[in-house]
Amino acid sequence: MKINNIIFLIVIFALFFSCSKEEIKKSVIKEKSLDLQVFEAYKEGKESLEGGDVLYAAKKFNEAEKLFPQSEWAPRSALMAAYSYYFDDYNNRAISELLNFFEKYPNNPNTSYAHYLLAMSYYNKIIDEKKDLEPLKNSKKQFEYVVKNYPNTEFALDSKFKLDLINEMIASKEMYVARHYIKKKKWIPAINRLKFIVKEYDNTIFIEEALHRLVEIYYKIGLEDESRKYAVLLGYNYPKSEWYKSTYKVHEKDYKISDIKKKNKTSTLKKFKSLLNWDEQEKNTNWI
């Protein structure tokens, strides 16, 4: 009986050991299989994207990320899913994917590109800046973030260019509203819009018109000193401007090109914005 018991224990132990080995083996096979599934899903997504099937590509990239969130392929897949949506103008989906990317992978090496892609996704949503400022504001904020935090990247260079375009669009919208107020003879809100352009968007093409409109409005409402102030500012910085020619007509004078030797136009304009030294500047112009 003792021998039988010993044999029984040996058999049980052998079976247990055999099962343990099988479980370990299966576990290893399963792990390798998972990694392979991730790679295959990513590869399929990439091929679908190249083939033009954007939505299916995004689906496969999402699948690759979810299969193995701890793998190196996960953040790459998440970013590729966002790019797939962006590529085919599914900008809202791209934005959603990118916000999730930042939350899950804040220290990823590709974060600079992700922020640039987010800015571009907002930028592509701009349809009519006169009706909807939200995409303009969001894209501007994101491009500024890229320029500030990743100044030495190629993304910063393009972001600066996009910011110039965005500023032109915002200034255009402000001028559109100002003209509307002028047409309705609502002088105070018109003045506020025009001053906002002078203060914030002096590097846009709308600065000359904004200064001229301020000359017009102040002259109409009887504030001739204020009108002359902006006329001097316009003449000093843009003496050959068509708007400056129109400004002369407001005060019933013949147009003359200013003989002031200008220095740095931008710095002069910013310095002049304080309007503290305009009387002294006026003495040096041929406005009068």
Image (cartoon, rainbow, N blue to C red):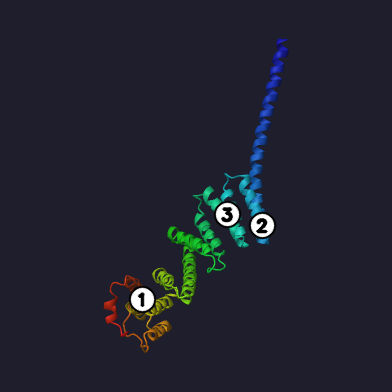
Q: Position of residue 52 (x, y in %)?
A: 67, 62
Give the mark, 1 or 2, whose residue is nearer the N terminus.
2
> Is residue 271 positioned above or below 239 on the image?
above
Label 2 sits on a secondary structure element that is helix
Q: List the residue tagged with mark 2.
A: 55
Observer-nearest of 133 and 14: 133
Amino acid at pointer 2: Leu
Label 1 sits on a secondary structure element that is helix
Q: List the residue tagged with mark 1.
A: 265
Amino acid at pointer 1: Lys
The answer for how far apart the CA atoms under marks 3 and 2 are is: 15 Å
The answer for how far apart the CA atoms under marks 1 and 2 are is: 50 Å
> Is residue 212 positioned above or below 77 on the image?
below
> Is residue 66 positioned above or below 121 on the image?
above
Disc ID at residue 96: 3
Q: Residues within 10 Å of mark 1 (few under 14, many from 20)?
A: few
Give the mark, 3 or 2, whose residue is nearer the N terminus.
2
The residue mark sitting in front, 1 or 2, is 1
Give the mark, 1 or 3, whose residue is nearer the N terminus.
3
| Residue shown at the point (61%, 62%) measured from the top left | 87
Instruction: Kindly indicate the quadrant of the structure image that contains residue 202.
Output: bottom left
Label 3 sits on a secondary structure element that is helix
| Residue shown at the point (66%, 50%) measured from the top left | 41
Asked if the residue at tag 2 contacts the one at tag 1, i.e. Cβ–Cβ closer than 8 Å, the answer is no
Q: Residues within 10 Å of mark 2 (few under 14, many from 20)?
A: some
Q: Position of residue 157 (x, y in %)?
A: 47, 65
Residue lying furthest top:
1
User: In which quadrant will I find the N terminus?
Assistant: top right
Amino acid at pointer 3: Ser
Disc ID at residue 194: none
The answer for how far apart the CA atoms under marks 1 and 3 are is: 43 Å
